[in-house]
Image: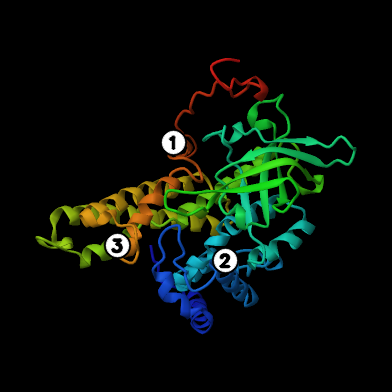
Amino acid sequence: MNFDDTPQEAAFRAEVRAWIDANAPKELEAELKQATFGNSGLTSGDPIALAKAWQKKKAEAGWACLHWPKEYGGRGATPIERVIWGQEEGVYGSLGGLFIIGHGMCGPTLMAWASEEQKRKLLPPLASGEEVWCQLFSEPAGGSDLAGLRTRAERADDGSGDWIIRGQKIWTSGAQNSDYGILITRTDPDVPKHKGLTMFWLSMKSPGVEIRPIKQANGQSGFNEVFFTDVRIPDAQRLGAVGQGWTVSLTTLMNERLSIGSGMPTGFPELFDYCLNLETEDGPAVDNAMVRSRLAQYAVKASGLKYTGMRAISALSKGETPGPENSIGKLVAGASMQELAMFALDLQGETGVINDPRHAEAAQKFQAMLLRSPATRVEGGTDEILRNIIAERVLGLPGDIRVDKDVPFKDIPTSGKR
């Protein structure tokens, strides 16, 4: 394979590089280089305001959501041009973390299922960072079984055609900073669980929506519980037909695994640099045979993730929808991050317990990575779910036994008793 730029790609790269050099917030570069997974590293200003300012500047110059159509706030760029932009944006790309769900998951779902009028209204401010979106899927009682959700949507009894939402979501990233969200609900409990779902979009400022941030092990509060108490949604905000929610959600999920898997760091570059500079009792860490062996293993995984991601880019360049094979990147990256962080802390010895970036070795990068890494193996599909997807839909192996497949949702037992 030849990964050199074509003349057209080289010209595009030069244009990107010139614009970033002239417009990037270089005063933030040093702080952004100290970012840890789950923490932007920004202390000189409001991280949300700084992220929105950079996204707005990109949008005004035509660099926001490059692969989106121009009429929806994008540039109509090719997948490879999108890759080139990411390479050249470099450290400033971490400012876009606030928008990853909206741009990577909600936006593609709206493009596939919203009306043309809604797309032209909702997508440009989403692309420009003016509005932030979240994804309201997971529930406390469902675990890994998304189709087991219990948040109900019922028609209002006033003849308006509106829907009344009651229930709870959990694990909703960024809900506290979001203006809108896409919401999957149960509208028919009398049919099997995958067939009785319906998808909507709504304002997170709607009466009856309550957001409660969850304190995480790493000290952050990126995830939330969201409660719905008699929330009214017009039928015009439905995505897809009534009962078609599972099909609509697959659009979101396939894009989710592509977005998370392709953008999830493993920490390998940081570990490699750390080992190059770490002095042990026996000399430089990188000269140790055991350390070199582990680095080689991590390098192989990082390379595999890179080229698996390029396969996805190739598929997108042909107009294909992200498929189940994108579960591979997320599955491998999440487990690698946790394993790599634990190895780095082993190398740090007793200083590995220090969780203060001012005093910890490697500015606490690996401590933050370890504390955040369990979430990476749950969000966007647990390891177990992803293994099933890869086994069944990529490798063609027999599916799991699903005793509730054809059972009406209302008849599925929720405990040892019916």
Residue at point 60% right, 34% down? Answer: 147
Q: Nearer the viewer, residue 130 or 117?
A: 130
In the image, what residue occupies the spot 64% across and 68% down? 128
Chain-order first, disc 3 or disc 2: 2
* Foreground tag (3 vs 2): 3
State whether residue 322 appears in this view. no
Name the amino acid, label 1. Glu
Front residue (pair 311, 34)? 34
The quarter of the displayed image where residue 365 is located = bottom left
Residue 360 is marked as: 3
Question: Is 61 situated above or below 379?
Answer: below
Q: Nearer the viewer, residue 286 or 280?
A: 280
Q: Secondary structure at mark 3?
A: loop
Q: Percent x, y for residue 114?
A: 73, 52
Point out the tag, 1 or 3, that comes first from the N-terminus: 3
Sequence-earlier tag: 2 or 1: 2
Element type at marker 2?
A: helix
Mark 3 touches mark 2? (CB < 8 Å): no
Separation (CA) of disc 1 from disc 3: 34 Å
Left-right relation of 373 to 296: right
- Checking the image for residue 48, the label placed there is 2
Disc 2 + disc 1, Cβ < 8 Å: no
Q: Looking at the picture, which amino acid does disc 2 mark? A: Ile
Disc 2 from disc 1: Cα separation: 34 Å
Q: Residues within 10 Å of mark 2 (few under 14, many from 20)?
A: some
Residue occupying the point 70% across, 47% down: 209
The residue singled out by tag 1 in the image is 384
